[in-house]
Image: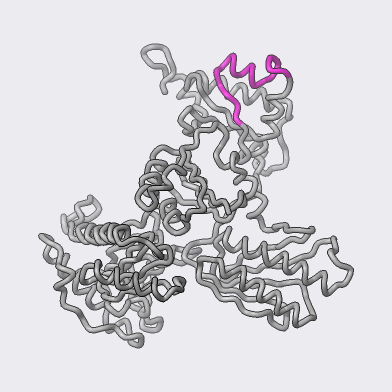
Amino acid sequence: MKSELIVDVQPNEIAIALTEDDRLQEITREKRDVDNFAVGNIYYGRVKKVMPALNAVFVDVGHEKEAFLHYLDLGSQFITLKNYVTKAVSDRRKAPSMARLQRGADVGKEGQIADYINVGDMLLVQVSKEPINTKGPRLTAEISIAGRNMVLIPFSEKVMVSSKIKRESERSRLKQLVQSIKPQGFGVIVRTVAEDKRVAELDNELRILVKRWEDSVRILQKPDTSDDSKSSNGKSKDAEVRLISEELGRTIGIIRDVFSPDFTSIQVNDDTIYEEVRQYVELIAPESVKIVKKYKGKEPIFDKYDITRQMKTGLGRTVGFKNGGYLVIDKTEALFAIDVNTGSKKIFEDHEENAFQYNMLAADEIVHQLRLRDIGGIIIIDFVDMDSKEHQEQLYKHVTELMSRDRAKHNVLPLSKFGLMQITRQRVRPAVEVNVTEVCPVCLGKGKVQPTILFTDQVEEQIAHMREHFGRGIRVHLHPYVYSYVTRGSIFRRMSAKWYRLYGVRVIENQSNGMLETRFYNRKGELLEIPSEGQLNAKGDDGEKSK
């Protein structure tokens, strides 16, 4: 199986697409230059409310909504963690020794959170679930630092090996190996990909993870010197609430979790992100560093690898599958509902067999959609009604087998007497949402547009303005239909050739453009705004337009 990772870096977001045999499997979008409360981020937060009825507290970690910390997420070593943080903050000269730290009593699975936490307490917490809809982040006090081969757990001494490693001899080898190299005061979970790894590789990664923890402690010990940290009288206020350790970027996180020898290429269209990815792959798999490539094509990277088309056809409310069947996917506050429809085509004349075959095909697409959209929580599937108990059992086994390849924790229940199947899937971040519809950029949804014949004249006028303001070398991105129109005819009569001769611009086909939408980019791929009249009239000393 051929796996590829395509990374599209834009000024406001990074989009990451994972494909297997050229079929889009996962799409992730991450905003840039904004507070990103990602899973794995560690915060120093202030307790705002204690809710005995919920056996939980609400914590201010800087998000607009207070984060939620339940008693069961405190962890057995919460008292030890709290004592360590208090000691580290009170003496900023050096970090407390993990090896010589005095252990507190274990926190049991049954108890009241009010016995351990009060309003105003400062806690070291980690995001376990990103903000979803109207809910703030969910937190845990069991701090962990994830690597590719292992997960480091401060304040624990246990070494655990992934249950997916089946060979008992290998499990025993890894456990003894990690036990011998890990520092005192830390526990380790050995991940599945560590199977058959050499001691030098594991030891090197363990050192990196320990250093990340030590760096986090140093940041925790630094006093907050930002302007917001003081009130008008000069005294400190709630500015101590701050980010202590940020999880690796989403691109690196995906590579860490899914990278395998099957990867044939990782394409990145940005120099900075390319260098980060290359360095990380060189660290975890030096022999594969050559698969990381800087995309240099003129066509948008997602168009080149057919990602844009697959997103628009596969992420709408209605999704088709083989033989004319289709799914209708609806989202509510509490759950996702998926309705299976056969369409007008029949595979078999027999109704029962026809329903069974369509349900089996639908199951393949449903499992694909769960992963593609990263749908979590409760999923209710309304399959086509079947009377045969044998067919119902076969469908259940088929879905269970397909879901077994899913990395997210999940549970599949058999069909109910109403023909409904229930699936629960781990939800740690909002489901992917891509708007596959387009508002007309000319009428803005009013239903009236300018004469089409005037559109190319308007584009040329905009090009002239952009050329005057930014100079030559501009890239004009147009919808494929418009692109075909302006590039038709012989090379000497094409409208695009005329624009190149007069203004030095190149025309690029872009599937993500609206029908009558025009975008301008410079040679570096940066989006250019159409200058206002005031900007156009601003001259430099040499008579050129200011850039």
Residue at the image position 69 percent from the left and 82 percent from the top = 416
Q: Is residue 421 left or right of residue 7?
A: right
User: Where in the figure is residue 431, as x and y percent of width and height?
Assistant: 54, 61
Residue positioned most to the top: 542
Q: Quadrant of the N terminus?
A: bottom right
Magenta stretch in the rendered image: 490-508
Residue positioned most to the front: 169
Q: Nearer the viewer, residue 28 or 19?
A: 19
User: Where in the figure is residue 136, as x and y percent of width and height?
Assistant: 42, 65
Residue at the image position 39 percent from the left and 49 percent from the top = 281
User: Where in the figure is residue 546, as x and y percent of width and height?
Assistant: 41, 21
Q: Is residue 421 left or right of residue 140?
A: right
Whether residue 239 can be seen here: no
User: Where in the figure is residue 35, as x and y percent of width and height?
Assistant: 38, 53
Q: Is residue 363 left or right of residue 472?
A: right
The question of residue 58 being in magenta is answered with no
Q: Nearer the viewer, residue 70 or 216?
A: 216
Residue positioned most to the bottom: 110
Image vertical order of residue 422 relative to residue 37, above or below: below
Q: Name the image quarter holding residue 491.
A: top right
Q: Nearer the viewer, residue 76 or 397?
A: 397
Image vertical order of residue 266 relative to residue 155, above or below: above
